[in-house]
Image (cartoon, helix red, strand yellow):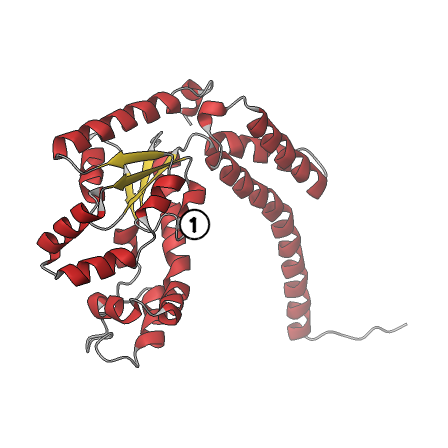
Amino acid sequence: RTYPRYSRTQAMLSAASGAIMSAFLVIEQVAKPLVWVLLGLAGGVATDRSRWMSKGFLSLLSSIAWAATLSRPGILSPLLCSVAVVIGSRLRVVGLTGGIASGKSAAVQRLRALKIPVVDADAISHQILQKGTPAHSRVVKAFKKFPGVVEKGGDINRAALRSLVFGDRNLNHVLKQCTHQAIAYEMVRQLLVLSLVRRAPLVVLDAPLLFESKADMFCKTTICVHCSEATQVKRLGARDKVSLEECRKAISAQMPVADKVRRATVAIENDSSLGELHTQVDEAVARLREEASAHPFAPLLARL
């Protein structure tokens, strides 16, 4: 019996196909545990370390481990997932927000003076719009038809872009679609680096739109710095040299401060002196550090 002879090209294609199929099988076996590791890290980040032995956390841990066991036979996935939950729980993210001209920036300066690492959402939004980034390309493509937004050199005029989307819900939605993913990715990357690489037990996420962007889901505690509207108007007018009407328009464009205070875990009132603000921030940091050290496995986690 004679068999058809394969050409060298056909033989190479056949060998390549076999190699690709083998690679896919390996990737499939590796990818599933990695997915559960990521889920475990997310579960750990979302866990209140001060309630490590609570029924809620134990239920979360057992549910994730059981789901991992069902998804893939063997002990590898649930084991990796459980370890990832423990590692992820070493990160305590504290969300910081506040109304415009409420004194949030002064609170951030005090936190940095206390050696608390801060992830700045505004700085990230500037960073991801640098020329050459994917978000920059998307924004240019979406807004180049509007005069003044994209400058001759290709840079984005942030002031013109902000004025354009201010009060326009549709354009604001377009801008979020262009930048939200990049901001979220960089935010999570910095949080994980600070926790797992630099081993910081406490990290502050400074985000003016903490609740509006739902970034509070990453936070175990949220702090809102607030003051009266009269104080906001006075500070904003002096800082930005704008009229009373423009101040009130800018304040009304944000989520009401009362709603932020209601949703926050800790509220810091900033109607008095800078020294009083520092005192309140110091007290909040002392409580958070105490809670962070309450983890029964804190000595072990500090070495991870």
Residue at the (22%, 39%) spot, across then down? 108
- Residue 72 visible (yes or no): no
Placement of 169 over or under 282, stated as above or below: below
Quarter of the figure that contains the N terminus: bottom right
Q: Nearer the viewer, residue 163 or 137?
A: 163
Q: Position of residue 146 (x, y in %)?
A: 28, 79
Q: Position of residue 132 (x, y in %)?
A: 30, 67
Placement of 257 over or under 60, stated as above or below: below
Horizontally, is 296 left or right of 232 in the view? Answer: right
Residue at the (49%, 24%) spot, across then down? 51
The answer to which image quadrant residue 251 occupies is: bottom left
Q: Nearer the viewer, residue 128 or 197?
A: 128
Residue for badge 1: 214
Horizontally, is 183 left or right of 237 in the view? Answer: right
Residue at the (48%, 37%) spot, across then down? 46
Horizontally, is 239 left or right of 6 in the view? Answer: left
Taking the view exactly as shown, the residue that stands out farthest to the right is 1
